[in-house]
Image: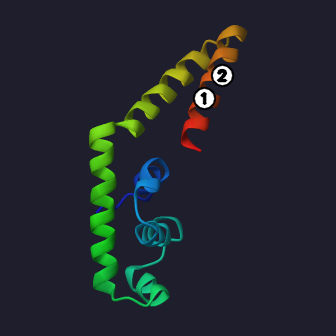
Amino acid sequence: MIHDKTQGNLLIDFYGELLTDRQNEVLSHYYSDDLSMQEIADELGISKSAVSDLLHRSTSQLQEYEDKLKLISSYQKRNSIYEQLLALNDKRVLEYVSKLKNIDREEIE
């Protein structure tokens, strides 16, 4: 299971649509709402072990998607390059970086 909340939320943002509604619900409660496994179990009327199993399977599945598709990795690399370009403070470069960032946002949404 992914213990870093930021990484968990990134995986959900990029690949959550590929999971079931139940998987997304459990992941959202755990990573976004910061609920404990017991709190999620109580909220959903299932056992704590069922929550644990769902979390482990779901996060493993999300990590497998990232390992194969590398969408987050390439997004982060692009953002790093954008920042370097922005540091040049050239008006034309700033305009093109803005256009590129808008394309990236459209792909995520």
Image quadrant where one finds the C terminus: top right
Which residue is drawn at the image coordinates 46% and 85% (left, top)? 44
Residue 57 location (% of width, % of height): 27, 66
- Reading the image, the residue beneath label 1 is 103
Residue 83 location (% of width, % of height): 55, 24
- Up the image or down, 85 lies above or below 57; here it is above
Q: Nearer the viewer, residue 91 or 16?
A: 16
Lateral position of residue 2 relative to residue 100, left or right: left
Colour pattern of the rendering: rainbow
Which residue is drawn at the image coordinates 34% and 62% (left, top)? 3
Residue type at the position of mark 2: Lys
Between the C-alphas of marks 1 and 2, the distance is 6 Å
Residue type at the position of mark 1: Ile
Categorize mark 2 by other alpha carbons within 10 Å: few (<14), some (14-19), many (20+).
few
- Up the image or down, 97 lies above or below 77; here it is above
Q: Nearer the viewer, residue 31 or 50?
A: 50
Lateral position of residue 30 relative to residue 109, left or right: left
Q: Is residue 21 visible?
A: yes
Q: Is residue 2 visible?
A: no
Q: Secondary structure at mark 1?
A: helix
Residue 27 location (% of width, % of height): 43, 67
Q: Nearer the viewer, residue 6 or 109?
A: 109
- Reading the image, the residue beneath label 2 is 99
Categorize mark 1 by other alpha carbons within 10 Å: few (<14), some (14-19), many (20+).
few
Residue 55 location (% of width, % of height): 33, 69
Which residue is drawn at the image coordinates 44% and 82% (left, top)? 40
Which residue is drawn at the image coordinates 69% and 9% (left, top)? 92
Q: Secondary structure at mark 2?
A: helix
Is the Cβ of the residue at disc 1 closer than 8 Å to that at disc 2?
Answer: yes
- Up the image or down, 62 lies above or below 81; here it is below
